[in-house]
Amino acid sequence: MIAVRNRALAALLAVAPAAALLAGSPAQAADPAIVIKSASVSRDTVVLSSKAGCTNVTFTAVLSAPIPDGSPAPSGIRVDLEGPTPRDDHLRGKDLTRVGSTTTYRATVPLCGSDHSGRYLAIVSGGVYTGPGQATYIDPAFFDISILRPSKLTLNASPEPVRKGQKITAKGVLKVNGKTYAKATVKVWFKATGATTWTYRGAATTNSKGYYSKRFTATRSGVWKAVYEGDWKRNAAVAGDAVKVR
């Protein structure tokens, strides 16, 4: 927390007039007169292909009191995003704008397909510049924001129909971000006709062409389901196929 507060203060003072900094004493941290009472984000996960455009995520902070009118720049509150790689650190930031005469501040930040997939740390922080080289902190709020690549999974359970006791093969292809995806685990589930729960039947691993295949013994009519659970960079995907057993 201290490191983040110091970093927030450094950012706050970085754009302060150089002459004022030279004239004043070192920056000092005071007990915050203004605090973030609540903070929220419109969504914490977006699914974008690498060729997609941008989509907006809105950050909202409700303060205990408004930033005083006439506070010298760079007083205010802002959101900064730090990405999953060093290259993405401080990917983008934006000042939150006061909503009317309330103590609510809001900013909309674009997330784009050209951004790296993965988990981003959003930091809502700020302060009030109180004089040369001095500022009062506003303790930050944190959010995890994920950019995931889209996944698509197919499933064909065959032969169809099948005789009871015969082998049935569940097979299909997994694509992530429009390309076949290898070495991924696909779990296969089955729900018999009339049943209310799914039964786990096994798992398969995709090959270099994104293809997976798993054989089972057919016992009852029902629906087969293939599930790719995704990860911190890729969205989950599900496919199903109904099979009648004679």
Image: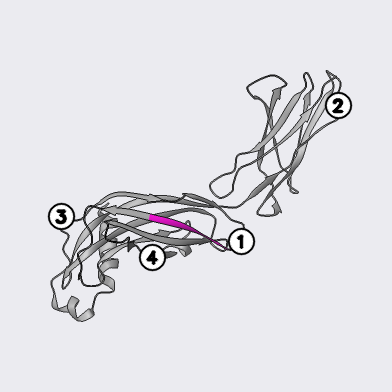
What's the residue type where badge 2 is placed? Pro
Q: Quadrant of the C terminus?
A: top right
What's the residue type where badge 1 is placed? Ala
Q: Which mark is residue 161?
A: 2
- Residue 99 in the image: x percent, y percent? 32, 60
Examine the image and state in which quarter residue 61 appears: bottom left
Q: Nearer the viewer, mark 1 or mark 3?
A: 1
Circle 4 packing at 10 Å, graded few (<14), some (14-19), many (20+), is some
Q: Nearer the viewer, residue 219 or 196?
A: 196
- Residue 137 in the image: x percent, y percent? 22, 59
**Left or right for 185, reference 244:** left
Most frequent secondary structure within the magenta stretch: strand
Q: Nearer the viewer, residue 196 or 164?
A: 196
Tell me, yes or no, whether the two marked residues, 3 and 2, touch with CB atoms within 8 Å: no
What's the residue type where badge 3 is placed? Asp
Q: Which residue is mark 1?
A: 52
Residue 28 belongs to magenta span: no
**Left or right for 110, reference 22:** right
- Residue 37 in the image: x percent, y percent? 26, 49
Q: Which residue is mark 4?
A: 94
Q: Which mark is residue 31?
A: 3
Q: Nearer the viewer, mark 3 or mark 2?
A: 2
Examine the image and state in which quarter residue 197 appears: top right
For the point 82% across and 21% down, which residue is it?
Answer: 245
Q: Nearer the viewer, mark 3 or mark 4?
A: 4
Circle 1 packing at 10 Å, graded few (<14), some (14-19), many (20+), is few
Rendered view: 229 above or below 6: above
Disc 1 to disc 2, how far (Cα)?
40 Å
The stretch of residues the image draws in magenta is 52-59
Q: First in sequence: mark 4 or mark 2?
A: 4
What's the residue type where badge 4 is placed? Lys
Q: First in sequence: mark 3 or mark 4?
A: 3
